[in-house]
Amino acid sequence: MGSDIAFWLALVAMLIGLAGTVLPALPGIALIWIAALIYAIAEGFATVTPVGFAALTVLAAAGLASDLVLTNAATRFSGASWQATLGGVIGGVVGFVLGFFVGAIGAAPGGIIGALIGVIGIEYRHRKNLRDAVRAGGGWLAGCLASRAVQFVIAFVMVVIFVWQAGFRGVWS
């Protein structure tokens, strides 16, 4: 009975994490991995095997890295300088913090808006060309959207692996 409750709690946390790969206000892949870790430890790695958990860990690392890699690659592909990319990171952090304290905006949208302003602002200052700056910002946004899609697919696979190991091999067997 306790195993069933633990499974369902972990699965609910994972579904929130799956939604978080698309909705920036929610935690994503990291929440899925943490839920799997807590469940695996609580169950003594009886249903979520060490090999299965290792696969979840590799997938989580790839999903988390995809955000940085895809966003950076798309930003650079659109012609943005490394300074604009760095400006996007700084703008994202500032926007996140400001958005957190401004209830009408919210932390996640504030982070996205801040990053976009950071990329466009630095690139405009660097090139003095608004069209190129907006193109760089569009590249950042395209990379961000691509990374969200990749993270969603990876997160979905992680949830499927968990359900296969803990559900079909454990709770429902």
Image (cartoon, rainbow, N blue to C red):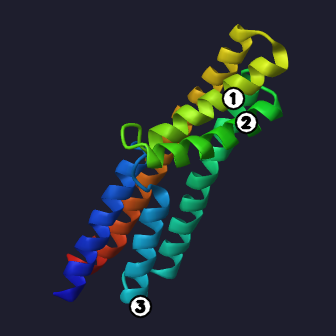
Q: Which labelled disc corresponds to residue 87?
A: 2
Question: Horizontally, is 105 left or right of 87 in the view?
Answer: left
Residue type at the position of mark 2: Gly
At horizontal 50% and vertical 47% (from top left) the residue drawn is 151
Q: Earlier in the sequence, mark 3 or mark 1?
A: 3
Q: Which labelled disc corresponds to residue 44?
A: 3
The total of numbered circles placed on residues is: 3
Quick check: 171 above or below 70?
A: below
Which quadrant: the C terminus?
bottom left
Q: Earlier in the sequence, mark 1 or mark 2?
A: 2
Q: Mark 2 falls on what kind of element?
A: helix
Say which residue label 1 marks: 119
How far is the residue under mark 1 from the one under mark 2?
Answer: 5 Å
Residue type at the position of mark 1: Val
Question: Horizontally, is 118 left or right of 6 in the view?
Answer: right
Task: Tell me the quarter of the picture where residue 69 sits.
Answer: top right
